[in-house]
Image: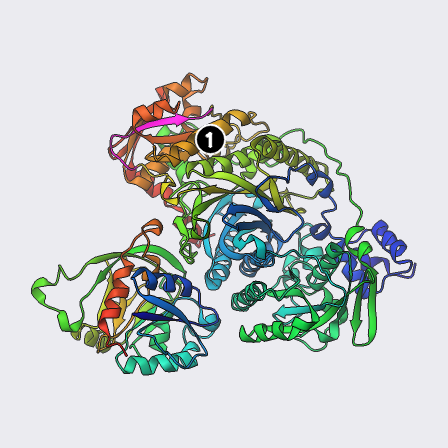
Amino acid sequence: MTVEVAKHRELGLTDSELELIVEKLGREPNDVELAMFSLLWSEHCSYKHSRKLLGQLPTEGERVVMGPGENAGAVDIGNGYAIAFKVESHNHPSAVEPFQGAATGVGGILRDVFAIGARPIAILDSLRFGELDSVRSRHLLDGAVRGIGHYGNSIGVATVGGEVYFEAPYEHNCLVNAMCLGIARTKDMVRAAAAGVGNAVVLMGATTGRDGIGGASVLASAELGEGDEAKRPTVQVGDPFEESKVLECCLELLERGLLVSLQDLGAAGLTSSAGEMASAGGVGIDIDVARVPLREADMEPFEIMVSESQERMLGVVEPARVVEVLAVCEKWQTGSAEIGIVTDSGQVRILRGGEVVGEMPVEALVDSCPLYDLEPAEPEGWIYGNRATLAPGASSEDTLLALLGSPSVASKRWVFEQYDSLVGSRTVRRPESADAAVLQVPEASNAIAVSIDGNGRRVACDPHAGTIEAVLECAQNLACVGAEPLGLTNCLNFGNPEKPVPAWQLDRAVAGLAEVCRALGVPVVGGNVSLYNEGPEGPIYPTPVVAMVGELPDPAQACGSAFTKEGDAIALLGPFAPTLAGSELAKLRGELEMGLPQPEVEVIAAACATVREAVRAGKLSSVHDVSDGGLGCALAESAIAGGIGCSIDVQPLRERGCSPEETLFGEGTGGFLLSGDREVLEKLGATPLGRVGGTTIEIAAGDRSLTVGLVAVESAWRSLRTQAEHDGA
Amino acid sequence: MRWGVLQFPGSCDERDALHACERTGAEARLVWHEERDLEGVDAVVIPGGFSYGDYLRAGAIARFSPAMEAVAEFATAGGPVLGICNGFQVLCEAGLLPGALLLNESLRFVCRQLDLIAVDGPETGHIDTFEARRPTLSIPAKHGEGRYFAAEEVLDALEAKGQIAYCYAPGQNPNGSARDIAGIRNEAGNVVGLMPHPEHAVDPLTGSTDGLRVFEAVAAAGVPA
């Protein structure tokens, strides 16, 4: 062995992985090859710690147009159209440089969607930060929100929804997951497989520079720690204007049938896009780095191959069409260069002019990374610590106000007003007006709904049940607007899989995800895995973020969450039997511990169907799923949104075995809060609790009864801006 | 009646504007930024977005485009021109409207449904019927650089000549604009620019149809070229 041992380790490869590479090549890799292997064999690109688990997920369904393995999944919505969607993480870049990290997270997920020929129509974001009393968390929140807005607003794709949670375990390692949905004519969609020996490989979009070198291996596949500022050069810089031109250019090329296939350049840049295209097509590929347009003239071949410069796409083009392709790029004022050729060699060959500087079998580079078994071990108890912030013995009124003001529960208006939620003229239900975002799709004469959810704290209490809850919450949110689920995508954000507890969390969460998707009959059409999310204090909360897309026939019927009519009855539907386990209140009291009740999936699925049909038939004035902060917070949210109070008696929940406190603030899945005509609600099987009306929220709950004015409730719920912009220590 | 909607690289709301024009019962087509000829166009929309990326000053590059040269001639000849958001910024940069749009007071982008007060033009302003002639329109705004600014004497002149076209309803100014100004018109009344987005208020499903009145008012304000 003459290869310096430190070098491959520095790039994130183990000694045994290097030995395997040497065996596959029949010689030692040179610097270019070692750099390329280190990226494609990183966790981020190879899924080496998660792939075995992911095989459990159900991926088939009659509406599935594209499943896992493509740039994005897609489902059929009728009339020859499909909706493509995907969620991806950009956690570590955002923890190091939140504005560019989040901005390029949005840019990357947009490219995944238009790479399959879909026009992006909506963005959602799932964000996690530490508590807002930390300067670092406020800095990360502010930067990430600005970054998402900068990219999405500038490129003209509506940001229609999302979620934000603030929990101490995300203090060092925040999470920024971005989702994009796009619409495509099913017959125009393209796959990423390279095909046609002799076809040209064309690089389009921005020039290639030294930004983002080693992002996938150095940043995404290792824990964060001391000296992360030094990693800033591994974060890419986004240019939404360049992306907007590349987007329009690619869609025009696809519409005119000028491309054989298309792939975005994301993590690991040219290395992964060329390697994966060749692997998918069962062909070889030659890339001449001397023909790649550069930002800096003296870049080394390995730098060109691993650069993560943004806003670049790789297309395969028949030789006779190259001139036309270059002309379309010229029209959109975006760069283009013919940099390679599809071969029958089965090799990825890197050339610099006439000189071969790297040559590897595609199979070795893309498909030979060893897959590892996890060594999971259940923790003996709650590992994340507790911090009480609510005074013991707080009154019911003060408890409700504290919950509503807790930034994870409070209104996210401060966040979503920084995003353009309207561009594209599809947004029928804007953020906070209903439980799911609703977009009209005139192309198919219907509408789609989308929701993204994942409460990491509850998953930490029980990774299996918590993940099932996240999927059920999505399903409930879709039911609230009358939508039927078509497909699901996910982003699994976990700690270091080489450690026993994060391994156990991942193992249990994926089992729960597979189980609930099978039970609901919802196929998983894509996903992303982000591991090694840890800081000096340990792993983040295990955070499977799930996003579900559904279809509804008539967007006008999508029900809102606001109370609308004085005198309407209020009723509860579904098998809701709340407890304090894993609740927001348990957190505020510093009483978190392991354990959650097991959700009744079949019964909840039936409740979803009942709500969906009632909404489609226009039978309800409002519907809201009971989630964070329990029934008290759900009531307050519907009351604030409608500007009308309410009064209820929780006696029916007492009969389900709940204590007065559990009825008010306990959490659990399966609860829908409805308002409307009392007889109609009773016929649906809902349990009447009270009435809409007045200017206070009154809840009769034995010795925990409460009455609070709407003004006080609203002011607590609207406090996020003050907490986020507070500039003290 | 046929509208032309300008399209720059980086435009965002051009398809929405096209759709809005069609909702008024008119025809509409996109005009590529390199087109020098507005052939067959009776009125022009300069849509929202980030023309050429707007990395310099919003609208500063777009004003030099061939299409904008054509729009300047069209406006001078009395043709109706509506600039929305980035289009308003472009019209100010081009000198077709006075003043400038600065960063929002909050230094943040804001997207919000607002009430706008439509203020009558100079030729129809009668004090006795002023309230009735000031309908309130529900229209969303979404911008990061929408704070209207002009020298005090310019603002006084705009008021005196009836050139303030739209104001934010009391208490709803989202960006710190001078005198709550949301939109203005030129002295002749045929060139109108506003920050809020009337093209996003043309469909009851997505919120409101009040924006149609903005398109209709502009179409009626000019002498078709």
The residue drawn where x is 72% and y is 73% is A299
Rendered location of residue B205, percent (x, y): 34, 49
Q: Could you tell me the amino acid type at mark 1?
A: Ala
Residue A705, visible in the rendered structure: no
| Quarter residue A192 falls in | bottom right
| Quarter residue A303 falls in | bottom right
Residue most toward the left? B128
Which is nearer the eye, B174 or A554?
A554
Rendered location of residue A593, percent (x, y): 57, 29
Rendered location of residue A505, percent (x, y): 66, 36
Chain ID for label 1? A
Start-end of magenta stretch: A564-575
The residue drawn where x is 37% and y is 36% is A401
The residue drawn where x is 47% and y is 23% is A577
Quadrant containing the N terminus of chain A is bottom right
Instruction: Locate residue B54 relative to residue B98 in the image: left or right.
Output: right
The residue drawn where x is 48% and y is 52% is A729
Q: Which residue is mark 1?
A: A609
Q: Residues within 10 Å of mark 1 (few under 14, many from 20)?
A: some
Residue B149, visible in the rendered structure: yes
Is A442 above or below relative to A596?
Answer: below
Rendered location of residue A638, percent (x, y): 35, 37
Instruction: Locate residue A57 relative to residue A632 in the image: left or right.
Output: right
Is A228 above or below relative to A405?
Answer: below
Which is nearer the eye, B191 or B25?
B25
